[in-house]
Image (spheres, rainbow, N blue to C red):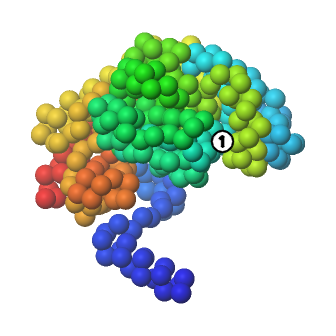
Amino acid sequence: MLQKRIEQELAGVHEKGLARRITDLQYEDAVTAKDAAGKRYLVFSSNNYLGLTFDERVRRAASEAALRCGSGSTGARLTTGGVTEASALERDLARFKHGEAALLFNTGYMTNLGVLYGLARPGDVIFSDELNHASIIDGCRISKAQVVVYKHKDAADLETKLQSVQVSPGGVRFIVTDGVFSMDGDICDLPALVQLKEQYGCVLMVDDAHAVGVIGADGAGTASYYHLPDTIDLQAGTLSKSLASVGGYVVARAEVIEYLKNKSRPFIFSTFLSPADVAAAHAALRILEQEAPRLMARLARNTRLVRDGLAAAGLPVVPGNTPIVPVLAGEAGRATAIDFKLRGAGILLSAIRPPTVAPGASRLRFTVTAGHTEEQLRYAVVKLTEAWNEIR
Ligand SMILES: *Cc1c(COP(=O)(O)O)cnc(C)c1O
């Protein structure tokens, strides 16, 4: 039975042009990689927004930690898996995000599972933006709370639902949103969410995975961008994007963090990050704290160059001001064909297709980093425009 089901579903995936494939890459610097056959690519689809994966200080911190403390953490944090630097990183993350305390998880994905599964339970209601990241959707599912999806960034729809959905006695209402949405690159309407959270007595969770190092003058993400410190109850994030490593974290009141340490199964039952992962993220965070103005200015300049270049060439760019620049291609087949053509020209720029986005909303997702040179960005704009006009 299983074999038959797998065969049928795989055939469907191939027929629709939705088959996914893995290209193993080896990076040579923050924006250049080669594949197993030795072909070189300029990468415009990574989340390495500040280009810090190749910063000498970050790499040195990772390698020295591995040499000094071993290659793996050997266990979960509550057993043998401690890495001393983890607590220091948590303190620094909490300070950077203007919160009381932080807890590290193994990935951003596990952070959302760990927080939502840890805090929400049957009888609670989670109000979730329809374009939230898959890890939030999965966190909602395993929490077994009631999930109410509201229209993307639509405060009026959220309010209608807050009024009409009853919570059981003792139940808690959560509002959960991405800070910067991963597929459209737009920013949540934090002031409206804060107002609703206060009016209706909800707990507000914002996932700043794509926001840290990207928005806010100090790179601290959504609350900083809107000049609304201390308004978000749960700030989730990742160490894998601007912070150039792997791992995730949540910042919240100290008591909430204490609770998660005791109750969050994804935290409790998985081997902790390696010393090198923690050290790299910590070094990247220090750099971001010290050099945010320089790094953010570079990222903003590069973002403008690409957004203006593509718009001037007449491509349908989703408007915005973040380095996630989606270009709407329509059908999956067209997005795939453009992607393929660009690979030939040595450019990696991912085609995003269903089920990640809605049918007919396939797109090329151009991500800009502070590590790209002006020449590299101009080249990519020219090549994308050429492929765009050639493939109709
Ligand atoms: C990337 C991302 C995650 C997952 O983070 P990982 O560290 O890659 O697991 C979670 N939420 C959002 C909004 C993301 O963009």
* Beta carbon of the mark 1 residue lies under 8 A of ligand 1: no
Is residue 100 among what the camera can see? yes
Q: Residue at the location (12% across, 40% down)?
A: 314
Find residue 247 and report its horizontal and vertical position in percent. 63, 39
Q: Residue at the location (71% across, 47% down)?
A: 265
Find residue 240 and report its horizontal and vertical position in percent. 56, 38
Is residue 212 among what the camera can see? no
Report the side of 322 relative to 384 (left or right). right
In the image, residue 216 above or below residue 180 = above
Q: Residue at the location (61% across, 45% down)?
A: 121
Report the side of 166 relative to 75 (left or right). left
What residue does disc 1 label?
A: 118
**Mark 1 secondary-structure assignment:** helix
In the image, residue 225 above or below residue 27 = above
Q: Could you say which is closer to the camera, residue 382 or residue 289? A: 289
Q: Residue at the location (47% across, 34% down)?
A: 175
- Residue 385: quarter of image: top left
Which quadrant would the C terminus be assigned to in this image? bottom left
Find residue 351 and report its horizontal and vertical position in percent. 33, 54
Q: Label 1 amino acid?
A: Gly
Report the side of 119 relative to 270 (left or right). left
In the image, residue 182 above or below residue 283 = below
- Residue 227: quarter of image: top left
Find residue 272 and report its horizontal and vertical position in percent. 75, 43
- Residue 66: quarter of image: top right
